[in-house]
Amino acid sequence: MQQRQLGTAGPTVSALGLGAMGMSGLYGPSDRAESLATIDAALEAGVTLIDTGDFYGMGHNEMLIGEALKGRKREQAILSVKFGAQRDPAGGWIGFDGRPAAVKTSLAYTLQRLGVDHIDIYRPARLDPDVPIEETVGAIADLVKAGFVRHIGLSEVGAETIRRAAAIHPIADLQIEYSLISRGVEDKILPVLRELGIGMTAYGVLSRGLIGGHFAKGDAKAEAGDFRAFSPRFQGENLDRNLALVEALRTIAQAKGVTVAQVAIAWVAAQGDDIVPLVGARTRTRLAESLGALDVALSTEDLAGIERAVPKGAAAGDRYAAAQMAHLDSER
């Protein structure tokens, strides 16, 4: 397994990480046995970076990962955990809590659910508009000093917030959506990360399966709890335009003898050694396909062809619904 370091202050991790969110129902029903088998297969393949959030299934995802890790050496997994997102019993999103006391309480529950004594990278899921980032990062820094956290990460914040956070404590990485059709990070955020020596863990590299080559109209069902049924890029004419981009990408993939998903993941990985793609594989089949992307070498000509097929800004629709976009400090 290839390795990459997350920034100058972060850990060395596998060149591909596993994002476990989809194993807790946010893309529709998931299979518990297959989820456990997929995590196990990832670890056996040398994937060390596993990303979760304490609000994924309201603890379900952490407990699932904790079960998968039983009997393994703790150092086999670099655990990245997001906290702070608030949800009601019906699953609705009701805000974010970055207060120091909430940070420390959240970690206490996370350690219990995962069955570990420390978290490798701990990060607020979003910026709390009512709490200065200095206070939230300062609270995590206290947890670093106490030995409960190894590194501090950020998620979906903009350049100014990154600078303010880094002034309080070294930041390992920023977790943010980055893919062929979500490239806003390139303008202001990525240059600041590189200036400060902060890595990036890129989620949504297949845009929730939209550019993975397997999605078709009607696949996302609201009654199954799949948030793609409401996501702007998966609606009406937006979906038609975006799937046309996928077909253009498929032509390139077929010429190289690889899959659309592998080209999309390889493109993200090719944007810099300081970027680690996270794949949301929910099955061993999808995991194996994603791992194959590490063997895809993209030439200068390949990259130019991909750019022509899927130009920057070509996606139709925002990456989240308006209410969620309003919470993204990274989009301001």
Image (cartoon, grey):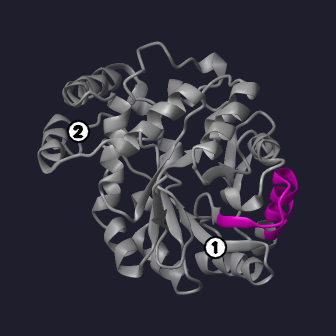
Residue at image coords 50%, 16%: 219
Q: Where residue 79 sits in the image (x, y, percent)?
A: 67, 58
Q: Is residue 143 visible?
A: yes
Q: Of all residues shown, which one is farthest toward the bottom?
A: 167
The amino acid marked with disc number 1 is His
Span colored in magenta: 104-122
Q: Position of residue 52 (x, y in %)?
A: 66, 49
Viewer-nearest of discs 2 and 1: 1
Along the horizontal axis of the image, is 31 left or right of 187? right
Q: Are marks 2 and 1 in contact (CB under 8 Å)?
A: no
- Say which quarter of the image contains residue 25: top right
Is 133 positioned to the left or the right of 98 in the image? left
Q: Is residue 83 visible?
A: no
Can residue 119 be found in the magenta stretch? yes
Image point (62%, 51%), residue name: 51
Q: Position of residue 187 (x, y in %)?
A: 27, 63
- The residue where tag 1 is placed is 151
At a point 76% along the width and 60% down the height, the residue shown is 74
Residue 314: give its label: 2
**Mark 2 to mark 1: distance in Å?**
36 Å
Q: Secondary structure at mark 1?
A: strand
Q: Is residue 167 above or below residue 184?
A: below
Q: Amino acid at mark 2?
A: Ala
Q: Secondary structure at mark 2?
A: loop
